[in-house]
Structures are given as C-alpha cells and as structure tokens.
Amino acid sequence: QVQLVESGGGSVQAGGSLRLSCAAFGYTYSSYCMGWFRQAPGKEREGVAAINSDGTTSYADSVKGRFTISQEYAKNTLYLQMNSLRPEDTAIYYCAASTTPGCSDGIAVSLNSWDFGYWGQGTSVTVSS
C-alpha cells in the first residue's frame, strides 16, 4: 500500500523560505512522476511543481524562479524548496504520485491532479505579510 507523508510546513514571513519533504512508503520514486499541489481556502487545488523519473521538471507560472522540486531516490523522498514566499502562497500543500506513465511526455510533466493517483495528507504553509 502506498503512503505519502509530508512534513516541513509552518508559518513564515513574506520573503522567507521553507522546505517541504515527502517520504514515500510502498512507492518507488523511479516510477513515473511525483508532484506538489496546493489548495488555498476557498480555492481549487492547483499544481505547483512536478518531476518525472528522468528529472524533467515543470512549474506553475506563479512559482517559477522561487520554488524548486527535487527528489532523492536513496531516501525515497521528494522535496519542494520554497524561497521568496508570498502571502498568496498560503495553502495546504500536498505531495502526489502518479500511477501511469502518461504524466509526462518527456518534455514537460503534468500539473493536473487527475494524472496523480496517490496523495499525502497535506502540510500547512502560512505566509504572513
């Protein structure tokens, strides 16, 4: 059974940084794609960043240049380094894993939630101005 466990959320002032981690149990990171999604109060869940097994990454326009997704196969862990945080980054952040190879065409990685079948419980990020 696949289990994804996020950690690293918290409260930070605008301009600060946080690093989220996602430990996977029962899932091999070398399979398909992994991603980070977020959901702010009153808003729909949106894709933030994703990475495929070859290391190809994709980012939402709103976080390009500020967030970096990475994975460490030896620890079966996914990371999201978030710099220059803004109040609009406040949300619950979810780690997700795909179940099909259709999550990436080799050039880009999907940021659509329907391409990811496994989800963590989420970790809260609050950015104050």
Image: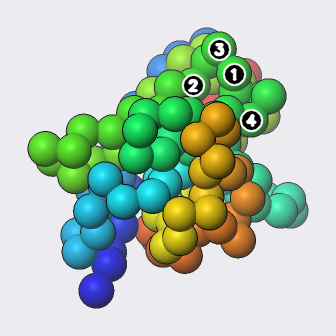
Residue at image point 32% right, 78% down: 2
Residue beneath disc 1: 64
In whole angstroms, how far apart are the C-alphas of marks 3 and 4?
Answer: 10 Å
Question: Pointers 4 and 1 in contact (CB under 8 A)?
Answer: yes
In the rendering, at what x and y percent does residue 43 appear? Answer: 85, 59
Q: Is residue 88 left or right of residue 29?
A: right
| Amino acid type of the residue that numbered disc 2 sits on in the rendered structure | Phe
Which comes sooner in the sequence, label 4 or label 2? 4
Residue beneath disc 2: 67
Are there few (<14), some (14-19), or many (20+) residues within 10 Å of tag 1? few
In whole angstroms, how far apart are the C-alphas of marks 4 and 1?
Answer: 6 Å
Residue at image point 23% right, 69% down: 25
In the rendering, at what x and y percent does residue 34 appear? Answer: 47, 53
Residue beneath disc 4: 60
Residue at image point 58% right, 41% down: 106
In whole angstroms, how far apart are the C-alphas of marks 2 and 1?
Answer: 6 Å
At numbered mark 3, what does the secondary structure look like: helix, strand or loop?
Answer: loop
Question: Pointers 2 and 1 in contact (CB under 8 A)?
Answer: yes
Above or below, comparing residue 78 to residue 82 in the picture: below
Q: Residue 4 is drawn in which quadrant?
A: bottom left
| Amino acid type of the residue that numbered disc 3 sits on in the rendered structure | Gly
In whole angstroms, how far apart are the C-alphas of marks 2 and 3?
Answer: 6 Å
At numbered mark 1, what does the secondary structure look like: helix, strand or loop?
Answer: loop
Q: Is residue 33 left or right of residue 5?
A: right
Does residue 113 show up?
yes
Q: Is residue 109 left or right of residue 24?
A: right
Which comes sooner in the sequence, label 3 or label 4? 4
Query: Which numbered marker is on residue 47?
Result: none
Question: Pointers 1 and 3 in contact (CB under 8 A)?
Answer: yes
Residue beneath disc 3: 65
In whole angstroms, how far apart are the C-alphas of marks 4 and 2?
Answer: 9 Å
At numbered mark 4, what does the secondary structure look like: helix, strand or loop?
Answer: loop
